[in-house]
Amino acid sequence: MPNAKSLAIRSEGRRDKGGSLRGTSNTLAYSRTQAPPAVQCAWCDHRFDGTDEYLTGRVRCARCGVATTSPWPSDEQLSAAYADWYRPESGRFSGLGDKVLRRTRAALADRLHRVVPPGPVLDVGAGDGTLVDAFVRHGRDAVGLEPHASGPHIRNAEVEDVDGNWSAVIFWHSLEHLRRPARALSHAAALLSPGGTLVIAVPNATSLQARVFGDRWLALDLPRHLVHLSPPALLSKIEALGLRVERVSYLRGGQVVFGWAHGLVGKLPGHPDVYEAIRRTEARQAAQSPAFRLYALGAAVVALPFALVATAVEVAARSGGTIYIEARREPATEESR
Protein backbone atom coordinates (compact mmCIF):
# COMPACT_ATOMS: atom_id res chain seq x y z
CA MET A 1 0.00 0.00 0.00
CA PRO A 2 1.43 3.43 -0.91
CA ASN A 3 2.28 5.71 1.97
CA ALA A 4 0.92 9.21 2.50
CA LYS A 5 3.99 10.82 0.93
CA SER A 6 3.70 8.88 -2.34
CA LEU A 7 -0.02 9.66 -2.49
CA ALA A 8 0.76 13.36 -2.10
CA ILE A 9 3.26 13.20 -4.94
CA ARG A 10 0.88 11.37 -7.25
CA SER A 11 -1.99 13.75 -6.58
CA GLU A 12 0.12 16.85 -7.13
CA GLY A 13 -1.37 19.07 -9.87
CA ARG A 14 -3.51 16.27 -11.23
CA ARG A 15 -4.84 18.19 -14.21
CA ASP A 16 -2.99 20.54 -16.51
CA LYS A 17 -4.44 23.53 -18.33
CA GLY A 18 -5.78 21.23 -21.00
CA GLY A 19 -7.57 19.11 -18.41
CA SER A 20 -5.49 15.96 -18.92
CA LEU A 21 -4.18 13.82 -16.07
CA ARG A 22 -0.58 14.44 -15.12
CA GLY A 23 0.02 10.69 -14.83
CA THR A 24 -0.90 10.45 -18.50
CA SER A 25 1.79 11.48 -20.97
CA ASN A 26 1.08 14.64 -22.96
CA THR A 27 1.41 12.52 -26.10
CA LEU A 28 -1.29 10.08 -25.01
CA ALA A 29 -3.53 12.90 -23.80
CA TYR A 30 -3.24 14.70 -27.13
CA SER A 31 -3.90 11.51 -29.12
CA ARG A 32 -7.38 11.47 -27.54
CA THR A 33 -8.16 14.97 -28.79
CA GLN A 34 -11.37 15.34 -30.75
CA ALA A 35 -9.89 16.38 -34.07
CA PRO A 36 -9.59 14.82 -37.54
CA PRO A 37 -6.62 12.50 -38.04
CA ALA A 38 -3.74 13.54 -40.25
CA VAL A 39 -4.38 12.29 -43.78
CA GLN A 40 -1.03 13.03 -45.38
CA CYS A 41 2.63 13.44 -44.48
CA ALA A 42 3.50 17.01 -43.52
CA TRP A 43 6.98 16.50 -45.00
CA CYS A 44 6.53 14.77 -48.39
CA ASP A 45 2.72 15.08 -48.90
CA HIS A 46 2.28 11.30 -49.22
CA ARG A 47 -1.35 10.42 -48.47
CA PHE A 48 -1.47 7.91 -45.65
CA ASP A 49 -2.65 4.39 -46.42
CA GLY A 50 -2.28 0.95 -44.92
CA THR A 51 1.49 0.97 -45.40
CA ASP A 52 2.15 3.72 -42.84
CA GLU A 53 2.93 3.18 -39.14
CA TYR A 54 0.35 4.54 -36.72
CA LEU A 55 1.90 5.57 -33.40
CA THR A 56 0.46 7.33 -30.36
CA GLY A 57 -0.27 10.89 -31.45
CA ARG A 58 1.51 10.62 -34.80
CA VAL A 59 1.82 8.68 -38.06
CA ARG A 60 5.17 7.65 -39.54
CA CYS A 61 5.22 7.97 -43.31
CA ALA A 62 6.05 4.81 -45.25
CA ARG A 63 7.63 6.88 -48.04
CA CYS A 64 10.02 9.25 -46.22
CA GLY A 65 10.10 7.92 -42.64
CA VAL A 66 9.04 11.26 -41.11
CA ALA A 67 6.23 11.24 -38.53
CA THR A 68 3.33 13.70 -38.65
CA THR A 69 1.32 14.71 -35.60
CA SER A 70 -2.14 13.12 -35.55
CA PRO A 71 -4.83 14.21 -34.87
CA TRP A 72 -3.89 17.17 -37.06
CA PRO A 73 -4.59 20.27 -34.93
CA SER A 74 -6.83 23.09 -36.06
CA ASP A 75 -5.69 26.71 -35.94
CA GLU A 76 -7.78 27.15 -32.79
CA GLN A 77 -6.12 24.20 -31.08
CA LEU A 78 -2.66 25.47 -31.96
CA SER A 79 -3.56 28.93 -30.71
CA ALA A 80 -4.57 27.41 -27.38
CA ALA A 81 -1.30 25.44 -27.28
CA TYR A 82 0.62 28.72 -27.69
CA ALA A 83 -1.46 30.66 -25.17
CA ASP A 84 0.00 33.37 -22.94
CA TRP A 85 1.40 30.82 -20.48
CA TYR A 86 3.68 29.30 -23.16
CA ARG A 87 5.89 32.35 -23.61
CA PRO A 88 4.82 35.16 -21.23
CA GLU A 89 6.32 38.63 -21.48
CA SER A 90 8.19 38.07 -18.23
CA GLY A 91 10.08 35.16 -19.81
CA ARG A 92 9.64 31.40 -19.69
CA PHE A 93 12.26 30.52 -17.10
CA SER A 94 13.57 31.67 -13.75
CA GLY A 95 16.18 34.41 -13.67
CA LEU A 96 19.05 31.90 -13.91
CA GLY A 97 17.30 29.96 -16.67
CA ASP A 98 16.78 33.06 -18.79
CA LYS A 99 20.44 34.04 -18.31
CA VAL A 100 21.58 30.61 -19.50
CA LEU A 101 19.26 30.86 -22.51
CA ARG A 102 20.60 34.27 -23.48
CA ARG A 103 24.21 33.14 -23.12
CA THR A 104 23.68 30.08 -25.30
CA ARG A 105 21.98 32.21 -27.97
CA ALA A 106 24.83 34.74 -27.77
CA ALA A 107 27.38 31.93 -28.19
CA LEU A 108 25.50 30.67 -31.26
CA ALA A 109 25.42 34.17 -32.74
CA ASP A 110 29.15 34.61 -32.03
CA ARG A 111 30.00 31.46 -33.95
CA LEU A 112 27.68 32.08 -36.88
CA HIS A 113 28.85 35.69 -37.16
CA ARG A 114 32.35 34.31 -37.81
CA VAL A 115 31.37 31.69 -40.41
CA VAL A 116 28.51 33.43 -42.24
CA PRO A 117 29.46 35.91 -44.99
CA PRO A 118 28.66 39.60 -44.40
CA GLY A 119 25.03 40.53 -44.86
CA PRO A 120 21.60 40.27 -43.24
CA VAL A 121 20.40 37.34 -41.15
CA LEU A 122 16.86 35.93 -41.03
CA ASP A 123 15.74 33.98 -37.94
CA VAL A 124 12.58 31.96 -38.68
CA GLY A 125 10.64 31.35 -35.47
CA ALA A 126 12.55 33.93 -33.46
CA GLY A 127 10.58 33.53 -30.22
CA ASP A 128 11.39 36.44 -27.95
CA GLY A 129 14.12 37.68 -30.30
CA THR A 130 17.08 36.67 -28.14
CA LEU A 131 19.12 35.33 -31.07
CA VAL A 132 18.21 38.28 -33.29
CA ASP A 133 19.32 40.70 -30.57
CA ALA A 134 22.66 38.89 -30.32
CA PHE A 135 23.27 39.36 -34.06
CA VAL A 136 22.31 43.03 -33.85
CA ARG A 137 24.93 43.52 -31.14
CA HIS A 138 27.47 42.27 -33.70
CA GLY A 139 26.38 45.07 -36.03
CA ARG A 140 24.41 42.76 -38.31
CA ASP A 141 21.11 43.55 -39.94
CA ALA A 142 18.89 40.84 -38.47
CA VAL A 143 15.18 40.14 -38.70
CA GLY A 144 13.17 37.59 -36.76
CA LEU A 145 9.87 36.06 -37.88
CA GLU A 146 7.41 35.16 -35.14
CA PRO A 147 3.59 35.08 -35.27
CA HIS A 148 1.82 37.35 -32.80
CA ALA A 149 5.09 38.84 -31.56
CA SER A 150 6.43 42.35 -31.72
CA GLY A 151 9.73 44.13 -31.37
CA PRO A 152 12.08 46.42 -33.27
CA HIS A 153 13.54 43.51 -35.26
CA ILE A 154 10.56 41.09 -35.24
CA ARG A 155 8.02 40.68 -38.04
CA ASN A 156 4.70 38.87 -37.82
CA ALA A 157 5.14 36.96 -41.08
CA GLU A 158 5.82 33.55 -42.60
CA VAL A 159 9.11 32.78 -44.30
CA GLU A 160 7.24 32.42 -47.61
CA ASP A 161 6.31 36.12 -47.31
CA VAL A 162 9.98 37.19 -47.29
CA ASP A 163 12.07 38.06 -50.34
CA GLY A 164 15.52 39.49 -50.93
CA ASN A 165 18.99 38.04 -50.43
CA TRP A 166 20.13 36.83 -47.01
CA SER A 167 23.55 35.73 -45.78
CA ALA A 168 21.96 33.28 -43.38
CA VAL A 169 18.53 31.82 -42.74
CA ILE A 170 18.14 30.10 -39.37
CA PHE A 171 15.56 27.58 -38.17
CA TRP A 172 16.47 27.17 -34.51
CA HIS A 173 13.99 24.59 -33.20
CA SER A 174 11.25 26.13 -35.33
CA LEU A 175 11.02 23.96 -38.45
CA GLU A 176 9.12 21.26 -36.55
CA HIS A 177 6.46 23.84 -35.62
CA LEU A 178 5.49 24.60 -39.23
CA ARG A 179 2.54 23.10 -41.10
CA ARG A 180 4.53 22.93 -44.37
CA PRO A 181 8.16 22.58 -43.24
CA ALA A 182 9.55 21.26 -46.54
CA ARG A 183 7.99 24.14 -48.45
CA ALA A 184 9.40 26.62 -45.93
CA LEU A 185 12.84 25.06 -46.28
CA SER A 186 12.69 25.32 -50.08
CA HIS A 187 11.81 29.01 -49.90
CA ALA A 188 14.54 29.64 -47.32
CA ALA A 189 17.14 28.05 -49.62
CA ALA A 190 16.02 30.34 -52.45
CA LEU A 191 16.56 33.37 -50.18
CA LEU A 192 20.24 32.60 -49.62
CA SER A 193 22.77 34.79 -51.37
CA PRO A 194 25.77 33.04 -52.99
CA GLY A 195 27.86 31.64 -50.13
CA GLY A 196 24.92 32.07 -47.74
CA THR A 197 24.32 29.57 -44.95
CA LEU A 198 21.22 27.65 -43.91
CA VAL A 199 21.26 26.72 -40.20
CA ILE A 200 18.84 24.16 -38.78
CA ALA A 201 18.40 22.64 -35.33
CA VAL A 202 15.52 20.22 -34.76
CA PRO A 203 14.75 17.30 -32.44
CA ASN A 204 15.99 13.97 -33.77
CA ALA A 205 12.93 11.72 -33.77
CA THR A 206 15.10 8.63 -34.33
CA SER A 207 17.53 9.42 -31.50
CA LEU A 208 18.40 7.01 -28.72
CA GLN A 209 16.55 9.10 -26.14
CA ALA A 210 13.47 9.24 -28.34
CA ARG A 211 13.44 5.44 -28.44
CA VAL A 212 14.12 5.06 -24.71
CA PHE A 213 11.43 7.49 -23.49
CA GLY A 214 8.82 6.84 -26.17
CA ASP A 215 5.61 8.80 -25.66
CA ARG A 216 7.16 10.71 -22.74
CA TRP A 217 10.10 12.08 -24.74
CA LEU A 218 10.32 15.81 -24.06
CA ALA A 219 10.84 16.81 -27.70
CA LEU A 220 7.62 15.23 -28.99
CA ASP A 221 5.78 18.26 -27.54
CA LEU A 222 2.41 17.61 -29.18
CA PRO A 223 0.62 19.41 -30.74
CA ARG A 224 3.16 22.25 -31.09
CA HIS A 225 5.60 19.96 -32.91
CA LEU A 226 3.78 19.04 -36.09
CA VAL A 227 6.52 17.06 -37.80
CA HIS A 228 9.09 14.68 -36.28
CA LEU A 229 12.20 14.53 -38.44
CA SER A 230 15.00 12.04 -39.00
CA PRO A 231 18.53 12.92 -40.16
CA PRO A 232 18.26 11.09 -43.52
CA ALA A 233 15.02 12.87 -44.46
CA LEU A 234 16.37 16.28 -43.52
CA LEU A 235 19.76 15.85 -45.16
CA SER A 236 18.33 14.47 -48.39
CA LYS A 237 15.98 17.45 -48.66
CA ILE A 238 18.80 19.94 -48.10
CA GLU A 239 20.99 18.28 -50.71
CA ALA A 240 18.06 18.19 -53.17
CA LEU A 241 17.84 21.97 -52.81
CA GLY A 242 21.38 22.27 -54.17
CA LEU A 243 23.04 23.18 -50.87
CA ARG A 244 26.34 21.76 -49.65
CA VAL A 245 26.14 20.30 -46.14
CA GLU A 246 29.18 21.54 -44.22
CA ARG A 247 28.47 20.50 -40.66
CA VAL A 248 26.27 17.93 -38.93
CA SER A 249 26.25 17.71 -35.14
CA TYR A 250 24.19 15.65 -32.73
CA LEU A 251 25.17 17.76 -29.74
CA ARG A 252 25.40 21.41 -30.83
CA GLY A 253 21.64 21.79 -31.32
CA GLY A 254 20.95 22.05 -27.59
CA GLN A 255 18.56 20.21 -25.27
CA VAL A 256 20.43 16.90 -25.56
CA VAL A 257 21.60 16.57 -21.95
CA PHE A 258 18.41 18.15 -20.70
CA GLY A 259 16.35 15.69 -22.74
CA TRP A 260 17.98 12.79 -20.91
CA ALA A 261 17.64 14.42 -17.49
CA HIS A 262 13.99 15.25 -18.12
CA GLY A 263 13.21 11.72 -19.32
CA LEU A 264 15.00 9.97 -16.44
CA VAL A 265 13.28 12.12 -13.81
CA GLY A 266 9.93 11.61 -15.51
CA LYS A 267 10.16 7.88 -14.79
CA LEU A 268 9.99 8.51 -11.03
CA PRO A 269 6.74 8.25 -9.01
CA GLY A 270 4.41 11.10 -9.88
CA HIS A 271 6.19 11.68 -13.20
CA PRO A 272 7.86 14.96 -12.12
CA ASP A 273 8.39 17.37 -15.00
CA VAL A 274 11.74 19.16 -14.79
CA TYR A 275 10.85 21.45 -17.70
CA GLU A 276 7.78 22.70 -15.86
CA ALA A 277 9.78 23.04 -12.65
CA ILE A 278 12.31 25.46 -14.14
CA ARG A 279 9.65 27.63 -15.78
CA ARG A 280 8.22 30.74 -14.16
CA THR A 281 4.93 30.24 -12.33
CA GLU A 282 2.94 32.05 -15.03
CA ALA A 283 4.62 29.94 -17.73
CA ARG A 284 3.70 26.53 -16.32
CA GLN A 285 1.14 24.31 -17.97
CA ALA A 286 0.33 22.58 -14.67
CA ALA A 287 0.38 23.91 -11.12
CA GLN A 288 3.25 22.74 -8.92
CA SER A 289 3.60 23.11 -5.18
CA PRO A 290 7.01 24.18 -3.85
CA ALA A 291 7.54 20.66 -2.46
CA PHE A 292 6.82 18.95 -5.77
CA ARG A 293 8.99 21.44 -7.64
CA LEU A 294 11.85 20.78 -5.21
CA TYR A 295 11.33 17.04 -5.73
CA ALA A 296 11.69 17.48 -9.51
CA LEU A 297 14.75 19.73 -9.29
CA GLY A 298 16.49 17.53 -6.72
CA ALA A 299 15.90 14.47 -8.86
CA ALA A 300 17.34 16.31 -11.86
CA VAL A 301 20.57 16.99 -9.97
CA VAL A 302 20.87 13.30 -9.11
CA ALA A 303 20.08 12.30 -12.72
CA LEU A 304 22.59 14.70 -14.29
CA PRO A 305 25.66 12.39 -14.21
CA PHE A 306 23.63 9.61 -15.84
CA ALA A 307 22.32 12.09 -18.43
CA LEU A 308 25.88 13.14 -19.29
CA VAL A 309 26.98 9.53 -19.81
CA ALA A 310 23.90 8.77 -21.94
CA THR A 311 24.55 11.89 -24.01
CA ALA A 312 28.14 10.83 -24.68
CA VAL A 313 26.93 7.40 -25.82
CA GLU A 314 24.26 8.65 -28.19
CA VAL A 315 26.43 11.41 -29.67
CA ALA A 316 29.21 8.87 -30.32
CA ALA A 317 26.61 6.70 -32.05
CA ARG A 318 25.48 9.72 -34.13
CA SER A 319 22.05 9.34 -32.61
CA GLY A 320 21.83 12.46 -30.43
CA GLY A 321 18.58 14.04 -29.33
CA THR A 322 18.93 16.95 -31.75
CA ILE A 323 20.18 17.38 -35.31
CA TYR A 324 22.23 20.51 -36.05
CA ILE A 325 23.05 21.26 -39.68
CA GLU A 326 24.91 24.02 -41.50
CA ALA A 327 24.53 24.00 -45.28
CA ARG A 328 25.86 26.54 -47.75
CA ARG A 329 24.82 27.79 -51.15
CA GLU A 330 27.82 27.58 -53.44
CA PRO A 331 29.46 30.95 -54.09
CA ALA A 332 28.95 32.39 -57.55
CA THR A 333 31.69 31.46 -60.02
CA GLU A 334 33.09 33.66 -62.76
CA GLU A 335 31.15 31.64 -65.35
CA SER A 336 27.83 32.17 -63.56
CA ARG A 337 28.26 35.91 -63.15
Image (cartoon, rainbow, N blue to C red):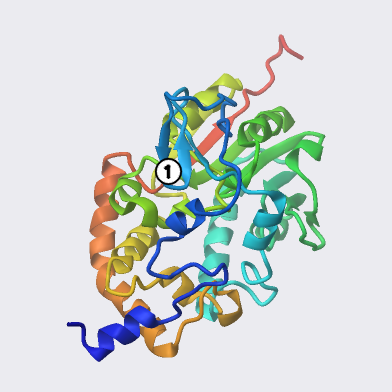
- State the residue in front, 173 or 251: 173
Q: Nearer the viewer, residue 127 or 165?
A: 127
Q: Say above or below: 120 vs 278.
A: above
Q: Which residue is mark 1?
A: 204
Q: Quadrant of the N terminus?
A: bottom left
Q: Type of residue at label 1?
A: Asn
| Residue 28 screen position, x and y as percent | 43, 55
Residue at coordinates 60% horizontally, 48% vertically from top-left? 35
Q: Is residue 135 visible?
A: no
Q: Is residue 124 above or below residue 303?
A: above
Tell me where residue 197 sits by quadrant. top right
Residue 164 makes an appearance in the image? yes
Q: Is residue 328 left or right of residue 310?
A: right
Q: Position of residue 337 (x, y in %)?
A: 77, 14
- Nearer to us in this view, 213 or 117: 213
Q: Quadrant of residue 315?
A: top left
